[in-house]
Image (tube, helix red, strand yellow):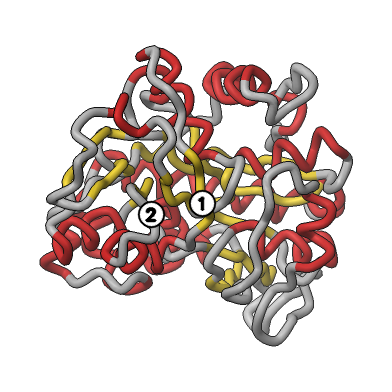
């Protein structure tokens, strides 16, 4: 977990983040090698979010094993925590990797990353802007100048909220970095005026504090926007094309299950998050992508360039790992 007092300041380069962030726990050999059953071993870093459901479905339903893979999942609290380990070869893939961080890394040359598969896209109420039930903030326009908690500064949450507010002609808030698990307490103590929370934290904050939904994060220009995916390095994809292709097939199959049968996701969530089975039945789920669509990813890069999070018109299609024919 990221040290509690470590904060990423606005404008701070990703290279600086990589220099100070380390993956917790014992490092493991990221090079693929066979287990005693002849399966290739991969280590995948993942967040305890609904985004990663397909990863756990692929493991628990034997889809990785069917493809000849032995996948070890290493939990992290922010996908950027796993970036140093990915660059060192200590993990092979990062699941639920927020695209903003990795597209910026690709543009700056900080990391030569590749996208193995799309993960999730925004869906109704899988992320919401929440305020305290007695808050004087009644409309999105009221957010101007107020503090909103986001998991990472200058990232997907502020990007999408800014886009929504800009379309409405509303002023922007001031963002404060607060990890998802700490957003509820920060709102309750009045340390922030609002939080931009994703599931399962969204439902937890509403249930525990009676917080009000001020704005659905899946609205306006953010509707159905690609949010996260499965990221690796160019080196890994080049050295292990068969393992990369096998991982892509397994994740695609699991994503199809998640997209067609939300109950499968709801049954999986209590296994790797702190969500209880009753809570899992009610939370908002993202849209699980069953194909990787460059056109959808370009929607994201256009927003990033408009808001100064990219300096060039980066084409995400060039970062996609093409499965062998």
| Number of the label disc, if any, that sits on residue 128 | none
- Provide residue 290's location: percent of width, then percent of height: 44, 35
The answer to whether residue 182 is seen in the rendering is yes
Where the N terminus falls, by quadrant? Answer: bottom right
CA separation in Å, label 2 and label 1: 8 Å
Identify the residue shown where x is 58% and y is 21%.
303
Identify the residue shown where x is 74% and y is 68%.
21
Identify the residue shown where x is 48% and y is 62%.
179
Kindly state the secondary structure of the residue where label 2 is placed: loop
Q: Which residue is mark 2?
A: 192
Q: Nearer the viewer, residue 29 or 138?
A: 138
- In the displayed structure, does residue 98 sit left or right of residue 216? right
- In the displayed structure, does residue 250 sit left or right of residue 134? right
Q: Is residue 222 above or below residue 36?
A: above
- In the displayed structure, does residue 267 sit left or right of residue 234? left
Instruction: Name the N-terminal-most of marks 2 and 1.
Output: 1
Q: Quadrant of residue 108?
A: top right
Q: Nearer the viewer, residue 209 or 291?
A: 209
The answer to whether residue 294 is seen in the rendering is no
- Asked if the residue under mark 1 is in contact with the one under mark 2, i.e. CB atoms within 8 Å, the reply is yes
- In the displayed structure, does residue 33 sit left or right of residue 94? right
Q: Which residue is mark 1?
A: 176
Identify the residue shown where x is 53% and y is 39%.
156
Q: Nearer the viewer, residue 221 or 29?
A: 221
- Provide residue 210's location: percent of width, then percent of height: 12, 57
């Amino acid at each position: 977990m990221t040290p509690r007092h470590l904060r990423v300041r606005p404008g701070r380069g990703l290279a600086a983040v990589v220099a100070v962030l380390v993956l917790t726990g014992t490092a493991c050999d990221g090079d693929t090698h066979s287990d005693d059953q002849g399966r290739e071993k991969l280590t995948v870093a993942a967040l305890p979010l609904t985004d990663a459901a397909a990863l756990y479905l692929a493991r628990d339903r034997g889809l990785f094993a069917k493809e000849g893979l032995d996948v070890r999942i290493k939990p992290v609290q922010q996908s950027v925590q796993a970036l140093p380990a990915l660059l060192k070869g200590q993990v092979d893939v990062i699941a639920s990797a927020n695209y903003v961080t990795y597209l910026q890394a690709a543009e700056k040359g900080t990391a030569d990353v590749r996208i193995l598969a799309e993960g999730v896209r925004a869906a109704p109420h899988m992320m919401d802007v929440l305020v305290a039930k007695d808050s004087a903030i009644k409309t999105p326009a009221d957010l101007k100048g107020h503090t909103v908690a986001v998991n990472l500064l200058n990232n997907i949450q502020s990007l999408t909220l800014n886009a929504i507010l800009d379309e409405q002609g509303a002023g922007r808030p001031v963002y404060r970095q607060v990890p998802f698990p700490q957003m509820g307490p920060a709102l309750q103590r009045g340390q922030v005026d609002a939080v931009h929370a994703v599931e399962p934290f969204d439902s937890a904050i509403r249930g525990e504090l009676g917080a009000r939904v001020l704005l659905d994060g899946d609205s306006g220009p953010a509707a159905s926007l690609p949010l996260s995916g499965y990221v690796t390095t160019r080196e890994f994809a080049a050295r292990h094309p068969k393992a990369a292709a096998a991982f892509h097939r397994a994740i695609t199959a699991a994503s199809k299950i998640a997209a067609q049968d939300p109950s499968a996701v709801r049954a999986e969530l209590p296994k790797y998050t702190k969500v209880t089975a009753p809570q899992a039945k009610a939370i908002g789920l993202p849209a699980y992508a069953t194909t990787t669509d460059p056109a959808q990813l370009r929607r994201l890069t256009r927003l990033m360039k408009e808001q100064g999070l990219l300096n060039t018109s980066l084409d995400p299609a060039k970062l996609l790992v093409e499965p062998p024919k």
